[in-house]
Image: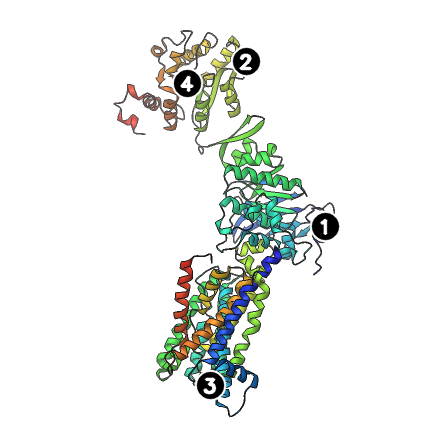
Amino acid sequence: MAAPSHRPAPSTGGAPQAGPATPLVALKDVDFAYDERPVLRRISFSLEPGDFVGIVGPNGSGKSTLVDLIDGIHQPGAGEVLVKGVPTRRYRRKDMAREVALVPQHFDLDFDLAVREVVEMGAYCLGKDPAALSDPELTLARLGVADLASRRFSELSGGEKQLVVLAQALMQQAPLLLLDEPASALDVSHQLRLFDLLKELNADGLTVLCILHDLNLALHYFDKLLVLSDGEVAAFGPPDDVLRPEVVEAVYGVRAYLHRHAGRTYLTFSPRLRGERRGRVHLICGGGTGAGMMRELADAGYEVTAGVLNALDTDEETGRELGLEMIVEAPFSPVGDEAHVENLALLRSADLVVVSAVPVSHGNALNIAAAREALAAGIPVWADEGVRAGDFAGATDGLAAAGVQFFAGEEALLTAVRARSLPGSGRTTAVGAAAARVAAPPEDDSQPEGAAT
Amino acid sequence: MTKLARTGAWPGILLAAGILLVCLVLALALGPAPLSVGRIWHLLLAGPVQGDLDNAIFWQIRMPRVLVASLVGAALAVAGVILQDLFLNPLTDPYVTGVSSGAALGATIGIVLHLSNLPWITVLAIVGGLGTLVIVWMAARRRGRIDIFVLLLAGVTISYLASALVTVLMIKANEDMTAIIYWLMGSFSGRGWPDVRVALVTIPFMVAPLFFTREMDILLQGEKRALELGVEVERTKRLLLVTAGVLTALAVSVSGIIAFVGLVVPHIVRLLIGPGHRGLLPVSLLAGASLMVLADLLSRTVISPNEIPVGVVTTFIGAPLFVYLLRRGRRV
């Protein structure tokens, strides 16, 4: 049977009407609904041959449905899905399988087939043309698992099964490979191996569109990302442009922070407390003694400010990643008068001033003075007991007499934060005082209501 | 490598064909008047001759009965393979689609109306079976797709309904009750050449699925995966369902409802040679024929001159064999 031979090179293809300028995949104003429930709305984007694109988005945002639409499994309610310029509804399944291969999210087989047989099924769409027939052994070898060929599929581990399904999809020799969360069942080493493999296949000319959940992998591996949010394209473009913290916050409803480490960018996340705006806390810290508190307070919904910190100090860097308002002095310099004045102005608008266990020397003694000013202005000041031990300037003497409440280390403060009993957010100072007792239990363990939370 | 996989089914097929041949010879030879193998060969070459008792036993009694039994067994086994793998449900047999119950209802109506066995009872059974298939089919169709799960439920429901109607008819026509019960239990007693002609119609429907072995293999991964790999799933499903339905209706119309063959033969063969349909379908076909011929032989010889219903015998042979193979484990 002399079927028209098909090669995986993306520029050649079996579909009619495919001009040189036609994108491999194009979606134009696509709407899709399951029964009455709308899943995708006004989706428009296109993929060029050789693209390496990741799709990210929350659960239920329509990622799998989008992939199924491109493979012609579903037809859009409105708009058009074109593969090589031809609407997917005009493809027969066999012709579609020659253009688009899909690696499904869930794959299992209750029947006792050899891996070779499972992989060979991928060549179904190529018909009986021996010239076009792919070799299952070679395909497995390309993925580095040639030894699996004679094993039973049902005996494989989850990671091995995933590679076998990938091999099955590659047997189709289609120019476009779609993957639906291929990494979700894999450990970290298999994940990296899989994405490296995809990168290699892409370098050989395969166009890849891959759904994934790990935003850091998305950031590091893909040339472009498509962010789906509630059935719409929230962003499409290079990862650094697309995965900005404000986009992640808007799409996922979590706090996102960008960090740079060893030349790479990483995102970290914290849950966001819905709609609750809390009070304003000013931190006096430095040398990394305040970094943990900064993040916990910010995550808990407090507006955090800090000062005076030296530039390049660990706390200053953390504050910058968290986007805090801070008063910053030049690196390795003592707190200058100008910075001190700015710091005073900043902390006057705080509901609470917290002093970390920062070592105090003449260089930053002015910050402790600022805390006294806050007390004088009627703003409560809480201080880590450790600050007295690390005071080499005598600046903390008499703080207790001035009305500072001491707490027993960072953990005690964080307990109070989690119990949501810091001053601010409309709570009375009495509640704040109760929290202070929680924070320092040895002084007030007779108060039952303090332990109740 | 690919060639090796393709030839891999042949040893199993040849072995199964050999076993069937042995079963056929035994069934032709044994009975109240035993015939030697040489005599069988002689009679086979001579063809039907008037006035010779051995010849009459061979050509008019045993041959048609053995042929009907083998065709019915093969048809039920092939239908069983198709339905188990289409439903992806190991407990499926050709009777869950409701086709057999519909056929039974048709046959019962024929018996109650005192119509002749051939063609009327057979025709009514076929009409009942295929009519049920159409009803179940329409219940399971949604937006041009056949929902396999709904089809299964509809089939089971229709089965109960048809069985209830059969029961009502049995009570109404008490003098025919024995005939109805006998028919329901299944038998090859007294089957002649007209029955063979009906059973021969199954052959194209047994051959057709052999052209869809790759599609059936791929469908083991589920309908969605099959679509992704390029199978026209709805078309294939439709073709296979109609094939299995027609095979079941034809088989039931000439033999009644014979239990266990359609359920157990595909499982036994799958355990022996694996789930790939290039081997599974032809070997099940041959094994179904062998089992049925053997069961019929036992049913008419063990307590001769009385007959045990053949469905009882298939169960007695199939059940222990199946349990033994299950105990031996999946890999044989």
Q: Distance between the Cα atoms at labels 3 and 2?
A: 108 Å
Q: Distance between the Cα atoms at labels 4 and 2?
A: 23 Å
Q: Distance between the Cα atoms at labels 3 and 4?
A: 101 Å
Q: Position of residue A7 (x, y in %)?
A: 69, 50
For disc 2, the neighbor class at 10 Å (few under 14, some 14 to 19, many from 20) is: few
For disc 3, the neighbor class at 10 Å (few under 14, some 14 to 19, many from 20) is: few
The nearer-to-camera label among 4 and 2 is: 2
Instruction: Write the residue at 40% across / 73% down.
Output: B313
Q: What is the chain letter for disc 4?
A: A
SS class, disc 1? loop
Q: Position of residue A131 (x, y in %)?
A: 69, 54
SS class, disc 4? strand
Question: Do callouts 1 and 2 mark residues in contact (Cβ within 8 Å)?
Answer: no
Sequence-first tag of 1 and 2: 1
Instruction: Write the residue at 51% across / 83% down.
Output: B39
SS class, disc 3? loop
Work out whether residue A220 or residue A144 is closer to the camera in this orientation and state it: A144
Do dots 1 and 2 share one subunit? yes
Give the residue pinned by disc 2: A331
Q: Quadrant of the N terminus of chain B?
A: bottom right
Sequence-first tag of 4 and 1: 1
Residue type, numbered disc 4:
Val
Looking at the image, residue B204 lies above or below residue A91: below
The nearer-to-camera label among 3 and 2 is: 3
